[in-house]
């Protein structure tokens, strides 16, 4: 693997990811984020683990493409899922937590990678093979656990995993009937259009065209890639040193995202105070 191969792999990954965004989002809207998200995590983890068997540049390109396809729609489906439970002035806080988690996982991932790469030679495997295998299997385990913690909606927490997880959530789910009514009422008061929205409803061509015309969404279509570790390697640092030196950058991003989160939280508190915010009885 050289720099050109890495760049080609990243291009294939991003192209596949972008190509799968719309189909993935539409599929998630049809079958529900509570089903799509665990499946996506499990598929992604399986493909990631299979990278330990790569023996050629072609294999690297194929797995990068499959990883991109498996992630398509994940971000929009999470935003959609959160909108089932939170009001519009509450979503920015939750989404900031979501984005803050990304650099935090990168910090943890860099630390884990530094350790896993030290396993080179074990069973005649290279360190990168152990890295892909272990981190991929970790994702699969998390994906399986996700099946047990994502209800379809506020009123369907007892239907998690098609009602087969009553041993974990009880027969009535997380909320009482009164709490469910309060939860649904507050969402509908915030956005009455959600009253006719079904979390298993497909999106038609008209809805897609309206989204395409929304210029506020255009900046989100621009992809970004992280080349920090590769840049550090080309400067002469070892793999271990490159992973360690990448952590401060992730940490600063985490601090920045956390600051934005706190500012949004303060703004939402002010909004709630000014409008007499509170749960509807």
Image (tube, helix red, strand yellow):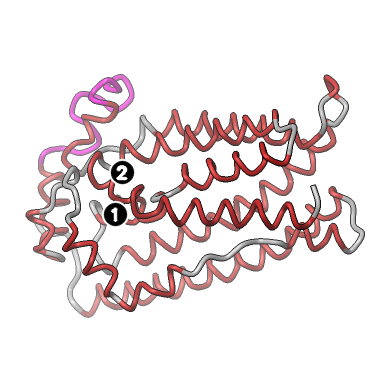
Q: Secondary structure at mark 2?
A: helix
Q: Is residue 253 left or right of residue 118?
A: left
**Residue 259 x/y as whole percent:** 53, 72
Crowding at dot 1, Cα within 10 Å, few <14 / some 14-19 / many 20+, comes out as some
Q: Is residue 218 left or right of residue 71?
A: left
Q: Which mark is residue 33?
A: 2
The residue wearing badge 1 is 80
Q: Name the image quarter holding residue 263.
A: bottom left
The answer to if 215 sits in the magenta stretch is: no
**Is residue 114 depicted above or below 98 in this figure?**
above
Q: Residue at x 60, y 36 (%)?
A: 48
Q: Name the image quarter holding residue 129.
A: top right
The answer to if 171 sits in the magenta stretch is: yes
- Residue found farthest to the right: 236
Q: Residue at x 16, y 40 (%)?
A: 155
Q: Which residues are magenta?
A: 162-177
Sequence order check, earlier mark of 2 and 1? 2
């Amino acid at each position: 693997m050289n720099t050109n191969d890495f760049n080609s792999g990243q291009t294939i990954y991003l192209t596949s990811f972008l190509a799968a965004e719309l189909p993935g989002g539409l599929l998630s809207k049809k079958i529900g984020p509570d089903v799509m998200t665990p499946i996506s995590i499990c598929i992604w983890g399986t493909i990631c683990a299979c990278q330990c068997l790569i023996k050629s540049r072609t294999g690297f390109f194929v797995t990068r493409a499959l990883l991109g396809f498996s992630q398509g729609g994940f971000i929009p489906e999470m935003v959609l899922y959160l909108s089932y439970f939170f009001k519009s002035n509450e979503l920015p806080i939750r989404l900031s937590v979501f984005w803050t988690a990304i650099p935090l996982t990168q910090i943890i991932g860099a630390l884990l990678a530094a350790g896993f790469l030290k396993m080179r030679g074990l069973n005649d495997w290279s360190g990168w093979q152990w890295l892909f295998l272990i981190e991929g299997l970790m994702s699969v385990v998390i994906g399986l656990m996700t099946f047990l913690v994502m209800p379809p909606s506020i009123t369907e927490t007892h239907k998690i995993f098609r009602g087969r997880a009553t041993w974990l959530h009880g027969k009535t789910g997380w909320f009482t009937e009164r709490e469910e009514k309060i939860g649904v009422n507050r969402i509908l008061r915030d956005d009455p259009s959600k009253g006719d929205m079904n979390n298993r409803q497909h999106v038609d061509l008209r809805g897609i065209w309206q989204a395409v015309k929304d210029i506020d969404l255009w900046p989100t279509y621009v992809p970004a890639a992280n080349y920090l570790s590769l840049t550090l390697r080309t400067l002469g640092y070892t793999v271990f040193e490159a992973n360690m030196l990448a952590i401060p950058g992730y940490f600063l991003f985490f601090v920045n995202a956390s600051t934005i989160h706190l500012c949004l939280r303060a703004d939402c508190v002010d909004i709630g105070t000014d409008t007499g915010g509170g749960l509807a009885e």
